[in-house]
Amino acid sequence: MRRSLIPILILVFGFALLPPLLHKLLSPKLPPAVLRVSNIPRQLATFTFSDESERSHTLDDFHGKFILLNVWATWCPPCKEEMASLNHLAQIYEKKDLTIMPISIDVSGTSAVRYFYKRLGLNELPIYLDPSKKVMDALRVTGIPTTLLINRDGLEIARVVGAAQWDAPESLQRISELIGQ
């Protein structure tokens, strides 16, 4: 009886372990962030968004700092792929002049984003939301994820459309060059 269970147990464990293993082996690694720098820094339209305490903010609240603003959603697979690297980037730049600002466009609100952060171990990223999606019009975002690098004067100086590996050495070097650190 025991010998007949061994092949069944091997099959059960194989089916349980195979999908995550295949995902890890076959998933393409995200490319480093290729920030497309604007020849002329671009003025951004005014929009509001809220933090996890439901306090309203505008980009003017962060004037004087560089901002890496990422428009994303919990239901977006490419967004999910890049969030761990954004979290690590926030840790790297914690004491420097760069604010990592992920703005979720989820209509389900703070609880969905908080659950998403907890599930992925994203402990360095603040929670910002714009369920109205007005941020997309204001920043001319046509797809998510889209990330903007905003200078101390609140002007867009670079942009990345699509998911990127934000903590890749090439990404870190380019960000440092652009913000002068």
Image (tube, rainbow, N blue to C red):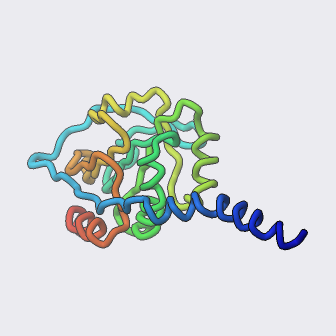
The image position of residue 13, as x and y in percent, is: 70, 64
Residue 128: tell me if it is visible: yes
Q: At 51% across and 39% down in the image, what residue appears?
A: 75
Nearest to the observer: residue 59 or residue 80: 80
Give the left or right position of residue 161, taking residue 48 as reference: left
Q: At 31% across and 28% down in the image, what residue appears?
A: 137
The image position of residue 64, as x and y in percent, is: 31, 54
**Count of numbered marks:** 0
Task: Locate the C terminus by quadrant.
Answer: bottom left
- Residue 68 lies, with reference to residue 11, above or below; the image says above
Nearest to the observer: residue 136 or residue 19: 19
- Residue 141 lies, with reference to residue 102, above or below; the image says above
Give the left or right position of residue 152, taking residue 75 as reference: left
Residue 181: tell me if it is visible: no
Nearest to the observer: residue 19 or residue 110: 19
Residue 21's image quarter? bottom right
Q: At 42% across and 50% down in the image, what residue appears?
A: 101
Residue sticking out furthest to the left: 39
Give the left or right position of residue 45, taking residue 36 as reference: right
Task: Locate the N terminus by quadrant.
Answer: bottom right
Residue 99's image quarter? bottom left
Q: At 64% across and 40% down in the image, what residue appears?
A: 111
- Residue 36 lies, with reference to residue 32, above or below; the image says above
